[in-house]
Image: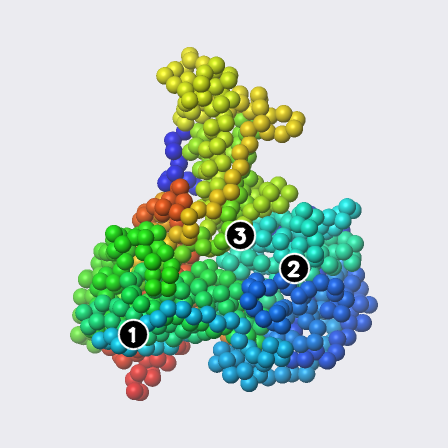
Amino acid sequence: MPLLLGTAVPRVEDERFLTGQGTYIANLDLPGVLTVTYVTSSVAHGLITGIDVEEARQAPGVVDVVTAADLDIGPIPPMNPNYPASMARPILAADRVRFVGEAIVAIVSETAAAGADAAELVVIDYEPLPAVVTIEAAETDDVVMFPEAGTNLVLRTEGGDADPESCEVSVSSVIINQRLAPCPLEGRAGASVWGDDGRLTHWSSCQGAHPVRAVFAQTYGMPVDQIRLIAPDVGGSFGSKARPTAEELLLPFLARRAGRPVRWVPSRSTDMTGLGHSRGQRQRFTIGGDRDGTMRAMRVHVDGDAGAYPALGPMLAANAATMSAGPYRFESMAWSTAAFITNSTPTVAYRGAGRPEAAALVERAVDLFAAAVGLDPAEVRRRNLVRPDQFPWTTATGVVYDSGRYEEALQRALDEVDYEGVRKEQARRRDNGNGDDGGRALGIGVTTFIDRTAGVPGSEYGAVELRADGSVLVRTGSSPYGQGHHTAWKMLVADRTGLPLDRIEVIHGDTDQVPRGGITGGSRSAQKAGSAVAEATDLLVVEAKRQAANLLEASPDDIVLDMAEGRFHVAGSPGAGAPQVTWSDLGERTVTADGPGLKCETDFDGLGPTVPFGAYVAVVEVDTETGAVEITRMVTVDDAGTILNPLLAMGQVHGGLAQGIGQGLFEEWRFDDDGNPLTANFSDYAFISAADLPSFESYLVETPSPNNPLGFKGIAESGTIGGPPVLQSAVLDALAPLGVRHIDFPLTPERVWEAIQEARRS
């Protein structure tokens, strides 16, 4: 068969999903399963003075009711050993609640309806405490959420040295990267059952069976081999399901008490308040350089909102700061971060996990610097991009960039959008005062950005084995939740064996079927899991040639694998009449009752993270009377190293870009002054739709990475990195003649209109 690498092979997963054959937590066949319902806090900050569950215990269909007083497990294992131990999160709140949605009582019932009815009967008394909703309030320590810690500060980091104020031109600003809810199609979900042998089986809607199993083992003090963790089909995550939440961690405890399987599938509004939020940063920067547009120095400080318990928020702030050099040749940088506890949903990863925040910071800084020196923002970027002959490039924050052609991507995006033509049309409109265009201001935004992928530490597992019928079974430690791993790994195996895709099966997400594995996150899968599968397949082919050599009575060095036919023959004798050995022949001869005779496995780590890049150009029209923003064109150019499958790559670009545009124009999780969520469902939390989006004009470039043998880089997060700042750049460009200098995300009609009115008043 022809080589598939680089071709647009349709996803093999889709038929099963589109025909309703997916297996999710909610439709698992678990005989005798009970439903778990949680009663959660209705106040953001307060002392628990009483919990009355007696009436709930007597309710029809209720099997068990559990509070913190019943537990012998917890707290949740910390993500970072540097976090204060006093800030650890309990499985169930006992004496104090710290955010609306924190679990207090677990109800186990025969049906979901019985659990919901019983939850209404639970009475919890609170002594309200002042809510700390913002970073500004948290950093004062006027109200401390963890009295034992004596502060709301979780973690500080700093590094580097820079003096941007000493440059010919310097600009300073403070910007906000708003809090978002990840909102995967399938929210959190889990199910647990104990075997007669004392072994736990747990199903989790997660991003990696083995890392999640490790958290359960640590929580329950069990050996990992006593836990079988299964990640079935997972309906999205975007980083938010990397670790189990408190409610899921409690399920084995509840199943053991009940002596029956239990399942937990929360409602959408419950999940939106409890799953974990992301972004939520206040960013300060000063950028300095020369009047000719050369950028020389930048100092950044990132304050992160960690939420009620320290999860990933402090590390996201640090990631944003260290990645804030972007694709530019800054001579010096200084960075610092601080992360604070607030009375809000804990902060977790969300598609990009620090890199979108970094891009928003540096791209806004570049636009402000370009305005200060009076140069076109695209030209300032061009003059400061890292050049191809400078790779590998180490930034002033210590991050190593492996390969890239940044200026080429920028020029391609500018050419595709006809940048000069749009500028001329913009000048024409401004000369006419926008009158002939109905008050619609034209703006064009430019963004050049980088990502860091495969930065999540750890190797990835891959194994291939030949079955008796000549088909190949692939075991991978990487669990997909929409990425297309089955298609990708089958392509890699097919290209090395000559087997058709339907003769290759992929198994993942089951710790009894796959011995080890990592997390699917940080765009690491193709680079690590893909390389592992490829290496294992190469080893399998070597072993197959040895077996074929015995059958053909030749030296293994003389055996050739005919990829077009998927057959082995002696070099120089490829004809139809010459002796040949098929994969099926080898399968029949090597597979025994004890297992496969040909099985190869490997663990791949690579030489370090890779740094893909992109250049986006957006053209928008802003209605100056209503503040409405319409995207008329969106041109994207993305690098992902060697492109495995352009169809999969473009799917990732489009999905990420839709989410990036959602952050740029619509999405924002908001609380009132008392910490009550104002956006806890899709009626209030604005969500992007197809009607809000143009047809994307997307292009791919390839700069293979030297850090893995396939040259892969990640591409899943590019749209969330480049999407928000390019829209901010475009909208502010449109409104510059009106005197509007800055608008924080999201650029909603209300916010844009208010900025226009303020500019007119000033």
Classify residue 568 by image quadrant.
top left
Any part of residue 114 in sight? no
Q: Amino acid at mark 2?
A: Glu
Numbered badge on residue 519:
3
662 or 91, nearer to the observer: 91
Question: In the image, what residue type sits under mark 1?
Answer: Pro
Q: Which residue is mark 2?
A: 248
Chain-order first, disc 3 or disc 2? 2
Return the x and y of residue 141 as percentages of the image width and height.
Answer: 54, 82
Quick one: label 2, few (<14), some, or many (20+) residues within 10 Å? many
Give x and y (percent) for residue 646. Answer: 37, 45
Question: How far across and down, in percent of the image, does residue 506 sit?
Answer: 54, 39
Do the residues bearing badges 3 and 1 touch, measured as CB atoms within 8 Å?
Answer: no
Query: Can you say whether 359 is above or below 500 in the image?
Result: below
Which residue does the image show at 61% across and 45% down from the upper left? 510
Residue hosting label 1: 164
Instruction: Tell me the SS state at disc 1.
Output: helix
Q: CA distance from mark 3 to mark 1?
A: 39 Å
Please tell me whether mark 3 sits on a helix, a strand or a loop: loop
